[in-house]
């Protein structure tokens, strides 16, 4: 396999076996030859396996792994039909500060987790009518969807198990001082859509504790 092929991948956020085939411009090269080359590149730490069939060059990682949106981008590559939410967004907003969380996202597909040398990326399932409340930006040409602060908080409560007797305000140490009236109105709108008795109880708990003004 030509070394120039590998260098051509250094500035791509990710690539697949099919991308290598296109770069070769030689249909006579057997798939087994490409797979052998990829295996050797991974073993030599020239490329990083993100998931089955999806890779990133080590050079690209070296150039960009310190960027603020790097992990968000990887999450979007691993499962495009998802948006970042839950602990990951709450921590980045300063609402959760105690420990470091994996990269957490929401999907309407089944719950799953990817682990690779870049970290742990988890995806929680939510029903289709609640797959809302996120904004889309772009980094390195990859669309990245992120929950608004209100939706990240809603998802955090909605997907967490609570017994009837639990007091979520007492159990969680959340810093919500920066939440605005608009944030709380948005939070309430998701509760209405969810028609969740549990979320209605949590909302009332928040009001009683004067998190809403």
Image: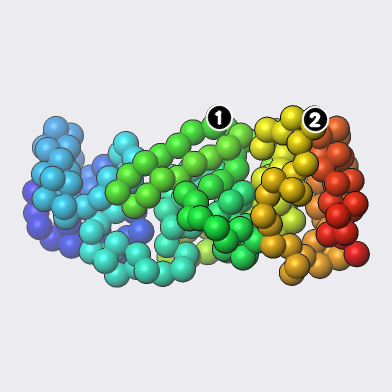
> Observer-nearest residue: 131 or 25?
131
Q: How far across and how far down the image is residue 76, in percent?
A: 49, 51
Picture layout, residue 122 above or below residue 94: above
From the viewer's perspective, is 182 left or right of 60? right
From the viewer's perspective, is 116 left or right of 203? left
Residue displayed at 42% across by 53% down: 74
Q: How far across and how far down the image is residue 115, in percent?
A: 37, 41
Residue displayed at 80% across by 61% down: 183
Locate the C terminus and report the quarter of the image it occupies.
Answer: bottom right
Q: Which residue is mark 1?
A: 110
Q: How far across and how far down the image is residue 119, in percent?
A: 37, 49
From the viewer's perspective, is 152 left or right of 72? right
Q: How is the image coloured?
A: rainbow
Point out which mark residue 30 bears. Answer: none
- Can you see residue 86? yes
Picture layout, residue 149 above or below residue 17: below
Q: CA distance from mark 2 to mark 1?
A: 27 Å
Q: Dot 1, crowdedness within 10 Å: few (<14), some or many (≥20)?
A: few
Residue displayed at 74% across by 48% down: 170
Mark before the other along the chain sequence, 2 or 1: 1
Label 1 residue SS: loop
Residue displayed at 66% across by 37% down: 160
Picture layout, residue 61 above or below residue 14: below
Which numbered mark, 2 or 1, is in the foreground of this view? 2
Picture layout, residue 3 above or below residue 200: below
Q: Dot 2, crowdedness within 10 Å: few (<14), some or many (≥20)?
A: few
- Can you see residue 145? no
Q: Which residue is mark 2?
A: 164
> Observer-nearest residue: 53 or 178?
178
Q: How far across and how far down the image is residue 152, in percent?
A: 67, 52
Label 2 residue SS: loop
Q: How many marks?
A: 2
């Amino acid at each position: 396999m030509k070394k120039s092929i590998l260098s051509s991948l250094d500035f791509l956020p990710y690539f697949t076996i099919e991308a290598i085939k296109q770069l070769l411009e030689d249909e006579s090269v057997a798939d087994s030859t490409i797979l052998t080359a990829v295996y050797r590149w991974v073993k030599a730490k020239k490329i990083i396996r993100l998931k089955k069939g999806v890779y990133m060059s080590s050079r690209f990682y070296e150039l960009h792994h310190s960027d603020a949106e790097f992990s968000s981008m990887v999450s979007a590559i691993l499962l495009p039909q998802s948006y970042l939410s839950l602990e990951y967004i709450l921590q980045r907003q300063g609402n959760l500060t105690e420990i470091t969380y994996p990269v957490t996202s929401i999907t309407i597909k089944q719950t799953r987790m990817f682990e690779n040398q870049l970290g742990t990326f988890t995806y929680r399932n939510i029903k289709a009518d609640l797959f809302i409340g996120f904004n889309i930006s772009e980094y390195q040409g990859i669309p990245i969807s992120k929950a608004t602060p209100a939706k990240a908080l809603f998802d955090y409560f909605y997907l967490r198990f609570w017994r009837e007797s639990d007091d979520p305000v007492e159990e969680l140490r959340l810093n919500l001082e920066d939440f605005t009236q608009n944030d709380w109105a948005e939070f309430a709108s998701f509760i209405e859509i969810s028609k969740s008795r549990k979320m209605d109880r949590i909302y009332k708990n928040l009001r009683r504790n004067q998190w809403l003004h």
